[in-house]
Image: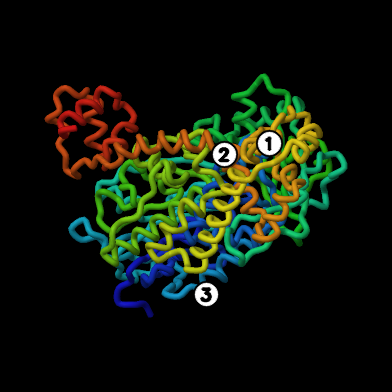
Amino acid sequence: MFKDTYDVIVVGAGHAGSEAAAAAANMGSSTLLVTMNLQNIAQMSCNPAMGGIAKGQILREIDALGGYSGMVSDTSAIQFKMLNKSKGPAMWSPRVQSDRMLFSQHWRERLEQTKNLDFYQEMVSGLIVEDNVVRGVKTSLGLEIKAKTIILTNGTFLNGLIHIGDKNFGGGRAGESASFGITKELEDLGFEAGRMKTGTPPRVDGRSLDFSKMEEQPGDEDPWKFSYSKETKPLKKQRSCWMSYTSPEVHELLKEGFDRSPMFNGAIKSTGPRYCPSIEDKIHRFADKDRHQMFVEPEGWNTVEYYVNGFSTSLPEDIQYKALKQCAGFENVKFFRPGYAIEYDYFPPTQLRHTLETKLVEGLYFAGQINGTTGYEEAASQGLMAGINASLKVQEKEEFTLSRSEAYIGVLIDDLITKGTEEPYRMFTSRAEYRTLLRQDNADFRLTAKAFDIGLASAERMKLMEDKKEKSEAFVEFFKNQSVTTEEINPILEAKDSSKVDQQGKLFKVFARPNITMDDMRKLESVEDFIQKNDLDNEVLEQVEVQVKYAGYIEKEKLNADKLNRLENVKIPEHFDYSVLKSMSFEAREKLTKIKPRTVSQASRVSGVNPSDVSVLLVHMGR
């Protein structure tokens, strides 16, 4: 029925588990994906969308590394938007509205077409661990399946408890049972566990809504896509989302249920996501606001089900219904299901290495919400990295990690294992020190060669990236070397209210002006001729525009990153004894002993460690 011993067993088939299984199998490891329901692979449990601020960058990084989330997002998208286009390119963030059912279907199809990957539907109830080394898993039917490495991606299912008003019941998400047994086993092994919560809004019948009372939110006129591959294409048609608002009347109605709310009556004691609060939390915390936005999002091409983004709640269902009916366009609303909150177990991620392998048990990896994160993209990126490293471990190859200056994924994992988290962790561009380097447009330049070297990104992906890079660099050189006369350029500058030039000069200098775009440059015959002769596509044109306009910023960040990486190269021995550093503060010694940072740079980011503590460490290490 099963192999004698799998190289990798992945427990859970959400976004983290799906990426983990795909990565491990594609790198040649015999892999088993175990999940409680094979019909719900990569289920979008919350909003039917991928990407957004910082999350879009992560998704493009997953794609550049050879993961599947970007391609599945493209093939199941019903709307595409590039957010923050009015700001600099470091802030541009792609986002798609997805067809929920297509997304899960396309993920399953890709996984079933992946070599080296087996599937099994059952609950994993425990682990087989000998001498702090993982040996396999136990199932609820009493089966034992052997493995060299195991990746736990249990999402919200570990002892999951669903709350709707004063009612609560066990569950991993609506309509699905919780998972039991693993938390206690891990605690018995010495792991520290905690509880977190997340929530979801009501799903409603679009036929009962009056969209004429809402503001339409269409997709981009010229949509792009997530994947760098040629396998997927931009959308030709799109579905709109809609925007409505709450009101003071709505807020008063919601307050009527606060005494029955698990958030306020003590039934929920765990911490929820700060940046995606429930509607009752928003009313409580932002009492001065008269209204809050609600994005009304279609769940797919051929369904009338809508997701009410911004109205996440665990209030009693009668209160949810009464309040939502007072919102513009919702006067005759019909529910498909009410909103709810869910509490679940997680394990503080300071118990992990950069590879996402646990420090306590060799061969055991954690990825996704089990590490205290929230969001599909954050989970998927962890699953990808865990799958890569579990496979490399089995193959006895060097581990694969990303630094903070190489990827948002590197920032995410470093934040988790260095600082930990006591509330659901969500990625933001502000968390990255080098966001001008970590743009969504250059993730392939940053990461595809690395993925190719470890056997994950294909030769075709590598060739695509090299071709794009070669064309981009050649076009930048063209702008640096090509001169333009005053007669050619001044009419273009005048039309853009930009000061005219009084002598011939290089195009690079003119193009670097903030208000001059690639479209303006293409009015010059020499530029358009170069584009046509070299068959340059939109990705190359965008890449070149960013490199020309932000050359100074990019160079400055590269220099700063190089300085940081010098400390990244100063390794700390794994069993370093911080107790001998009497000049270091007690708090720093305590935190560093617990976290066990791998480098001096990581040590400097540990909460409670100050610059003088780092100096003591450097002196002791002979630096």
Q: Amino acid at mark 3?
A: Gln
Q: Residue at x 71, y 30 (%)?
A: 501
- Which quadrant of the figure contains the N terminus? bottom left
User: How far is mark 3 from mark 1, CA to CA?
Assistant: 58 Å
Q: Which mark is residue 107?
A: none
Q: Which residue is mark 1?
A: 504
State which tag comes first along the sequence, 2 or 1. Answer: 2
Can the viewer see residue 52? no
Q: Residues within 10 Å of mark 2 (few under 14, many from 20)?
A: many
Amino acid type of disc 2?
Ala
**In terms of sequence position, does the residue under pointer 3 or pointer 1 come before the other?**
3
Q: Could you say which quadrant of the image residue 332 lies in?
A: top right
Q: Which residue is mark 2?
A: 90
What is the secondary structure assignment of the residue under circle 1?
A: loop
User: Residue 595, relative to residue 223: is it above or below?
Assistant: above
Q: Residue furthest right?
A: 212
* Amino acid type shown at disc 1: Gln
Instruction: Measure the alpha-carbon separation of dots 2 and 1.
Output: 32 Å
Q: Position of residue 269 (x, y in %)?
A: 46, 34
The correct choice, above or below, for 108 with respect to 515 in the image is: below
- Location of mark 3 (residue): 113
